[in-house]
Structures are given as structure tokens and as C-alpha cells.
Amino acid sequence: MGKKVTVVGAGFYGSTTAQRLAEYDIFETVVLTDIIEGKPAGLALDMNQSRPIEGFETKIVGATTGPNGEGYEAIEGSDVVVITAGLPRKPGMSRMDLLEVNAKIVRQVAENVAKYAPNAVVIVVSNPVDEMTALAQIATQFPKNRVFGQAGVLDTARFTNSIAETLNVPVGSVKALTLGSHGDTMVPVPSRCTVDGKPLADLLPAEKIEELVVRTRNGGAEVVALLKTGSAYYAPSAAAARMAKAVVEDSGVVMPVCAWVDGEYGISGVYLGVEAEIGATGIKKIVEEKLTDTEIAGLKEAAEAVRAKQADVADL
């Protein structure tokens, strides 16, 4: 049987993720769903017509879903489900402003995923992502390793790009990392950042690194403010698609993701941005690397901030 991946939500983020997944040509089917009648089918038709040009065979299927779970049978048997459904940010909004409205949407999606794709690995990207990941796990009742969120791959890419632009070097020569939450308690990890193997601290003064850290933390808001309508989707969709690819290929690649932490770094019982090995079962294991005392303190602070909010989502 060929592999099947579903992307829930056919906005810019979801449709671009579906396109990237299809162009990898490693799936038999990519399913794109949305509540707007006809939109996913139209996008799927358009993408399918690009297959002869781009040279991939993956078939894209569009399905409209209803408020009572109508249409979800299209996702049946999916190996991976990427949840992008929910409202994007508008200028001046924080990710947390979306909590209540997106919680209702994500819960309903997650319940249908549990019903129609009970063996899927779920990747959550709806904001605020740390809380929505916790909610998706509660709503699906899947084992915690099979539900994780996308943030670290994106935030790390933003950090990497800023470093490369500041130093005018190729992005490929920069190794960077961000952990913690996707938001105010994001923890960029300068101790793990190198350029051509040289520590970032040897190449930039501390205050310049701090500037890049702040820019990374506000990376999404910067895009939102420029676009004025909607939020980022090219870099976020690239991150989500890479994570789905790692699951389907059972690659064991290590990525920073929002995963359930149970004892690592002295932190327990919370979904948090950490490095993890990704494979067919979702999170194969959390990878605990050496961090500075300041970085660990930042991670613990992020855990407590997220923990308080994750406790609230159970009732939403």
C-alpha cells in the first residue's frame, strides 16, 4: 500500500504544505480538506494538473468537510495528518489571542482524525501551537509520541536565515537551534549556533546575537505586519512538510519540535519545544543535548508558561 498524508485546512499554509508533500513524490495520495465547499477540490485539481510539468505521480484529493464530521471519510487510513485548520493572526494579534476560537476547531478536527485515521501520526501547526498540540492529544487520545507540533523547525530556520544575512554567508554554513515555546518564551540556543563550525559568539558581539534572538522570537509577527492580511506560510509549510516526510520515511532525523517532555532537562508533563528523533511512530525519543545554565533556565521558564495554558485547553 502506498503512503497517505492528509492536510486539514486549505488556506495558504495548508495548500502550500499539500503542494510540497505532493512534489516530494513519496506518497501515493495527499488529501486536502477544508470547510469551504469546493475549495479543496479546486486546489487539488489545479495541483494534479501540475504533475506532468513537475514530474511527480502523487495524487492530490480535495474533500469538503462539514460541522458534524461529513467528508472526513476521505482521510481514512492516513499515515500522517497535518492539522493547519484555524484562524491566522491579524496585525497586532498575539498567537494566544487565537486560543479559544482555534481550540474549538482543533478539537473537532482531532476527534474526526481519531475516528477515521486511528493509526495516524498527527502534526499540529494551528496556533497557539504548544497549546493546540496538547489539545489535539487530549481530543484524539492517541499515545503522546504520535502527536507533536511544528515550531522549532520554523523558528530555527528564521534564526538561521537572520544569522546568514547578517554575516553575508550561505545559509548552508549556519547551524542554529531554537527550543522552548513558539512565542514569547522561545529559547534560541546561541551555544549550539555555529558558522562553518565556528561558534557564533566568536563572530558576532553578544548584543548583536541578542538582536537576532529577538527578531527570531518576533519572526511571525514581522511577516504578519508586512502582509497585513494573513500570516506566514512558505517557511511554515516547508517545516511541516519536512516533518511529515521524516515520519513517512521513518528517517530518525533529529528536529526541534513541540513534543511531550517527561523528565528530560528536569522538566515533566508538558508539550515543549525540544529536539527529537522523528520516525514512523512519531517521536522516537527526545534528544537531550548539553545546554548552558541560562538556556536550561529559559527552557524551564517556557515549560511553566506553556504548562499553565495547556491546563486550560482541556476544558476548551
Image (cartoon, rainbow, N blue to C red):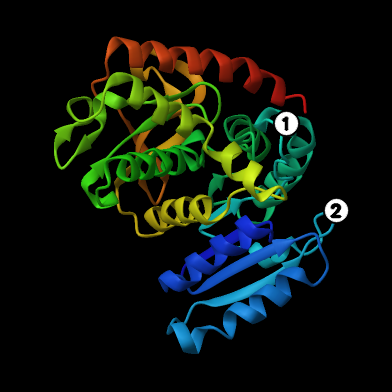
Q: Nearer the viewer, residue 209 or 145?
A: 209
Residue 84 is situated, as x and y percent measured from the top left of the image, at 64, 50
- The residue lying at 78 percent from left, 31 percent from top is 100
Answer left or right for 180 relative to 161.
right
Q: Is residue 303 depicted above or below 106 in this figure?
A: above
| Residue 118, x across and y down, in percent | 59, 51
Left or right placement of residue 128 versus residue 67 in this view: left
Query: Could you say which disc has been placed on residue 99 in the image?
Result: 1
Give the residue displayed 45% in from the left and 38% down from the top. 155
**Residue reaching furthest bottom?**
52
Q: Is residue 180 visible?
A: yes
- All told, the count of numbered labels is 2
Label 2: element kind? loop
Task: Quadrant for residue 130, please give it.
Answer: top right
Mark closest to the chain's N terminus, 2 or 1: 2
Amino acid type indicated by mark 1: Leu
Residue 145 horizontal/vertical position (percent) = 46, 37
Using the numbered discs, state the Cα–Cα distance from disc 2 to disc 1 in whole angstroms.
22 Å
Task: From the viewer's perspective, tell me whether residue 192 is left or right of residue 300.
Answer: left
Quadrant location of the C terminus? Answer: top right
Q: Secondary structure at mark 1?
A: helix
Q: Residues within 10 Å of mark 1 (few under 14, many from 20)?
A: many
Q: Where residue 234 sits: x, y (%)?
A: 52, 56
Neighbour class for label 2 at 10 Å: few (<14), some, many (≥20)?
Answer: few
Residue 312 versus residue 231 in the image, above or below: above
Amino acid type shown at disc 2? Asn
Which of 206 and 25 lies nearest the eye of the viewer? 206
Residue that appears at 44% across and 13% down:
300
Q: Where is mark 2, residue-wise? A: 68
Q: Nearer the viewer, mark 2 or mark 1?
A: 1
